[in-house]
Image (cartoon, rainbow, N blue to C red):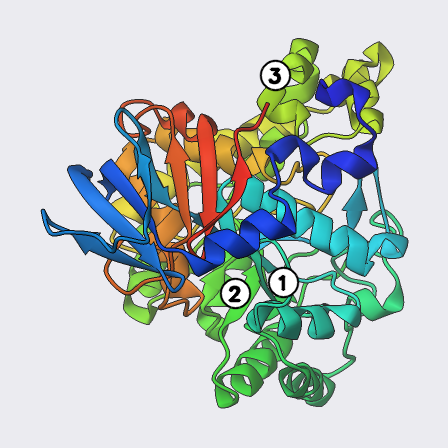
């Protein structure tokens, strides 16, 4: 059955991704799986052929030795294996098909989106803000292995200025999706309250929009950093402009959660970021998403994209009036993408640590699953090699998020693996050619058709 004929609810449930029955999944969990004749990404190149044994949820790289008799052998001749990607900047439970809002933060929607990420080869996703209180319960379940799909991490609701970013009205936000402290003391209290409930990092919105949306003050940013570091939590800052990035880095934030998009980054800020160990997540696709679908409505015929879309979004992308409106305001976004690419290359060449994210799920246009694969392409267009882009999307992002048990194909690490039909180091677009996905050594999804 073609995806176009399925309901969007079925699509979100993961049925187009060859989801396994509980009985088959249980049987797989009990038996080791031997992936034979494997070429796998070791962080720098494709190596092999090798034999990968998945047992007890972890990886063991075998030589010519004998595998356990009970192991199920899977011949992967002519295929390639990469670690599941780690999305260090996403939003989960905020959007549904062509709309967004607080009403979509439900267990069912969050679980469906985590399944989608996993089916697209993403093994963990950090939801950086806009999370409703249910987040804390779901995060704990995911950490304990009781929530299906990609591992859920995140920052809870995140913290912004009163009347500041993110704008509540345009983004259909409720009061419990962003904490807006009035002073530094309240900022510290807000961070501590979130730390008590359980978060993986702290998110602050630094940027403003002229006189209408106030920018976060240095005092407020420093208060967030001081409180977070006292609880051993990193701080990720939402920025757009060079001046906002400088404010954030000078205040001591650990992560610029978006790329700098208004000006070329200067040597002084590069040096400060390098000295302080500031991480950089470019999220190039966040701006490209505003025009790429309007540029070419035929893109909706791409099965890989269609598997991530609902009927409402497909209809919108095909609507001539919508496309004309999007293209009418696309020029600043195209400039943002151009400058973002330039700055990513400068940051990477300067030795500043780069992680992977797209802001997918922040709006319906930031399409979860598809956005991540498109981001890899944009990173390569910016001048990184496919191996560098893949390394950022796997091991480097795992390092940023403290996920020492995954992100690489190495002995003892979690067996979150993606089998591809073609070599992504020859063409980064080959990450889309997913044959199957393993989570903790079990097959959890198949080809996206």
Quick one: label 3, few (<14), some, or many (20+) residues within 10 Å? few
Mark 1 sits on what residue?
206
Q: What's the CA distance linking mark 2 and mark 1? A: 8 Å
Q: What's the CA distance linking mark 3 and mark 1? A: 37 Å
- The residue sitting at 33% across, 70% down in the picture is 276
- Residue 92 falls left or right of residue 314: left
Q: Secondary structure at mark 3?
A: loop
Vertical relation: 135 (above or below) 407? below
Q: Are marks 2 and 1 in contact (CB under 8 Å)?
A: yes
Discs 3/1, front: 3
Vertical relation: 418 (above or below) 294? below
Q: Secondary structure at mark 1?
A: loop
Vertical relation: 200 (above or below) 79? below
Asked which quadrant contains residue 381, the reply is: top left
Q: Position of residue 28 (x, y in %)?
A: 47, 52
Q: Position of residue 194 (x, y in %)?
A: 68, 81
Mark 2 sits on what residue?
247
Q: What's the CA distance linking mark 3 and mark 2? A: 41 Å
Q: Earlier in the sequence, mark 3 or mark 1?
A: 1
Mark 3 sits on what residue?
302
Q: Earlier in the sequence, mark 3 or mark 2?
A: 2
- The residue sitting at 66% across, 67% down in the picture is 216
Quadrant location of the C terminus?
Answer: top right
Quadrant location of the N terminus?
Answer: top right
């Amino acid at each position: 059955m073609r995806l176009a004929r399925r309901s969007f609810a079925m699509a979100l449930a993961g049925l187009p991704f060859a989801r396994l029955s509980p009985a088959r999944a249980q049987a797989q969990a009990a038996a080791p799986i031997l992936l034979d004749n494997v070429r796998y990404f070791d962080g720098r190149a494709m190596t092999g052929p090798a034999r990968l044994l998945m047992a007890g949820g972890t990886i063991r790289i075998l030589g010519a030795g004998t595998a356990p008799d009970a192991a199920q052998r899977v011949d992967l001749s002519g295929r390639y294996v990469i670690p599941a990607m780690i999305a260090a900047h996403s939003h989960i439970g905020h959007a549904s098909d062509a709309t967004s809002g607080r009403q979509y933060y439900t267990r069912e929607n969050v679980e469906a989106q985590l399944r989608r990420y996993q089916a697209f080869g993403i093994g963990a996703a950090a939801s950086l803000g806009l999370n409703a209180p249910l987040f804390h319960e779901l995060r704990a379940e995911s950490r304990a292995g009781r929530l299906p799909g990609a591992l859920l991490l995140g920052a809870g609701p995140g913290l912004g200025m009163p009347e500041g970013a993110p704008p509540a009205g345009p983004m259909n936000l409720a009061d419990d999706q962003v904490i807006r402290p009035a002073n530094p003391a309240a900022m510290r209290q807000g961070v501590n309250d979130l730390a008590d409930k359980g978060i993986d990092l702290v998110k602050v919105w630094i940027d403003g929009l002229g006189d209408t949306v106030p920018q976060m003050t240095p005092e407020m940013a420093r208060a967030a950093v001081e409180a977070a570091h006292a609880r051993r939590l990193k701080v990720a800052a939402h920025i757009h402009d060079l001046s906002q990035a400088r404010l954030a880095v000078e205040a001591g934030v650990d992560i610029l959660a978006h790329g700098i998009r208004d000006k070329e980054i200067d040597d002084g800020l590069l040096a400060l970021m390098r000295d302080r160990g500031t991480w950089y997540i470019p999220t190039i696709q966040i701006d490209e998403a505003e025009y790429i679908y309007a540029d070419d409505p035929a893109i909706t015929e791409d099965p890989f994209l269609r598997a991530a879309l609902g009927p409402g979004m497909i209809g919108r992308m095909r609507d001539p009036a919508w496309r004309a409106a999007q293209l009418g305001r696309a020029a600043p976004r195209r400039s943002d993408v151009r400058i973002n690419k330039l700055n990513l290359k400068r940051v990477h060449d300067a030795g500043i640590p780069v992680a992977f994210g797209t802001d997918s799920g922040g709006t319906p246009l930031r399409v979860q699953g598809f956005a991540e694969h498109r981001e890899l392409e944009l990173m390569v267009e910016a001048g990184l090699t496919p191996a560098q882009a893949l390394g950022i999307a796997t091991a480097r992002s795992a390092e940023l998020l403290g996920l020492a048990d995954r992100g690489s194909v190495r002995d003892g690490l979690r067996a979150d693996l993606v089998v591809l039909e073609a070599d992504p180091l020859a063409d980064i677009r080959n990450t889309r050619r997913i044959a199957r996905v393993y989570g903790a050594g079990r097959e959890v999804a198949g080809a996206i058709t």
